[in-house]
Image (spheres, rainbow, N blue to C red):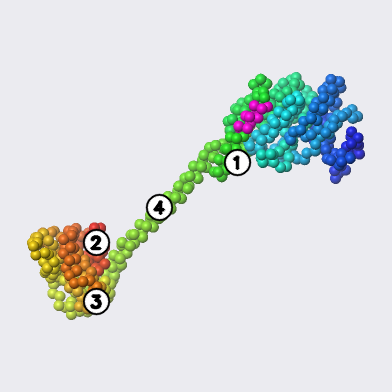
Amino acid sequence: MGKKIFLERYRLSIGRNGRPVELHCSSNARSYRAQEIGTGREVAITIVSCVPTDAAMLERLTSNAAAAQTINHISIPRLYDFRRQDDDLIYVTEYCDGHTAAAWVAVRGPFPIGPALRIALQVVDAMNATAFQRLYHPALNPDNILLLAGQIEDGDWPRIKIFQWFAPLPDLAARGDPQIDRIAEFAAPEQLWGGQVDVRAEIYSLGATMWFLLTGTPPTGPVAGKLRGVPKIVRHLLERMLRVNPVERPQDPLALASCLQTCLTRVERRENSRRCLRLPIAAVARLIRPDGEPPFPPKPLAIAAFVIGFVMAAALVFSGVWRERQAGSQAQHRRLHAPAATEQDVTASAPPPLFAGQVVSGSSAEEPSPTEKRSSSPGIAPPAEGPLQTPLVSMRENEQISTAAADKMLPKNVARSDDDDAVAAASPAKDGSAGESTARIAKTPRSTGKRIVSHSRSHSRRPGTTSHTLVRNARRAQPIPKLHVGSRPAELIGTTSDGRWILSVSDSGRRFIVPPPPGYGP
């Protein structure tokens, strides 16, 4: 057979095994790869061995082949020649290389929804091209749909060719043959009962083929309510195409193409949304089952993934804000309490003071200076040697100094009020260094507590500035609240150069340096 010449122009191609290269096999026909002897063009030769004996049938096949030679459609292989030879019908068509849709599903599983709809659109377009010639495919099924390499005109995948469009109608009554049974699974009910083939039977076979592409199995029995996991519009269209009654199916290929295009538009919009959310697209089609719910419904899964992603993003944002606030509060707490803690630690580690009114400093205790020896009041602290320590004077001296300064700065025509506070100021250190700060304590006879104002003096200021500051601070001083160190009452005895308060515990006489309460700062 390998050396046989068909129609005096074509010879079969021989493979590496020394046998003809077979392309396709059906119950009544076989297709082989061949070459045209004169030009070397590759063609496909289909040999139909079961030739009908009815003369009317042969005449109809001949007229159909003549009409098919005039059809030029991208999804239908071109028919180059048709004749009868040695009791066989020889069809010479265009050679196409690819894999059938049935083989693709067997190896890689069901198709996604988008590619399955694109295959259906190309088949409907071919049906519309052959409907005018009244040429109907007798056995439309996944074995007769060839997937080609490349893309269609719109740039989408896949591109197909449809085989056996002009072959004789197989005898579906001869059950028991696996190939006949395979064709019968996709044939319309009226084709099984009476052998009638028209555009409505083609639409039923196309619906069964789409069902197979989406699920991997042909439809069996009533299909209403069995398909899940696809958009509702696609599911309803498939149910209409697979109706038992031909009248209830779509009647026009153009109307069916419009419905398929609408379905494809919605599916592509859905795929774009999933792509924006970075959700798997092809895996959704693989979850389709012919009956029952899919193990993982795609819509709830997508919603759950979106909610989880949103919650995680919100948690990350709020955790960052919380960390920043915690870091800020900790830093503020350290700034407020670190100086007080340092002074308390230094005070606790220093030896007990030599005098009852001595200020506790961070330096080691030394012998009292002559100034300390001259202090006779128990509530007076002599000037300290450190730059951050504030010398204290007695309450009587403070009253005298502040009263004199206030009287000197008040205008002559303004009488001094009895409610004015007497400002007590400590005398500067003997060394008179520039920029040294002093603290002054004021006591008013009508107030229940002591009032404190602080003042800094340097050589750069003009004379008289100290008196102005004393009077202003004395007028705006606030009453001091009751102070406690732990559970023991304490008394304010002075301030440091940076505005912190010096407290003395009433029963033990121990000194503590703490920051002032809010609203009582310098």
Alpha carbons under labels 4 and 2: distance apart: 30 Å
* Quadrant assignment, res 417: bottom left
**Residue labelled with disc 1:** 281
Please tell me how many numbered marks the rendered image carries.
4
Q: Quadrant of the N terminus?
A: top right
Over which residues does the magenta segment extend?
253-263
Q: Are marks 2 and 3 in contact (CB under 8 Å)?
A: no
Q: What is the magenta segment's predominant secondary structure?
A: helix
Which residue is labeled 4 in the image?
322
Can residue 432 be seen from the camera position used here?
A: yes
Residue 104 forms part of the magenta stretch: no
Residue located 13% across and 59% down the image: 447
Question: Label 2 neighbourhood size at 10 Å, few (<14), some (14-19), many (20+)?
Answer: some
In the foreground, 144 or 466: 466
Q: Nearer the viewer, residue 420 or 347?
A: 420
Q: Residues within 10 Å of mark 4 (few under 14, many from 20)?
A: few
Q: Residue at x 25, y 65 (%)?
A: 500
* Helix, strand or loop at mark 1: loop
Residue 41 lies, in percent from the top left, at 84, 40
- x and y percentages locating residue 299 in the rendered image: 55, 37
Q: CA distance from mark 3 to mark 1?
A: 82 Å
**Which mark, by number, is residue 433?**
3
Residue type at tag 1 = Ile
> What residue would you read off at disc 2?
521
Considering depth in this image, is 163 or 356 the residue closer to the camera? Answer: 163
Of labels 3 and 1, earlier in sequence is 1
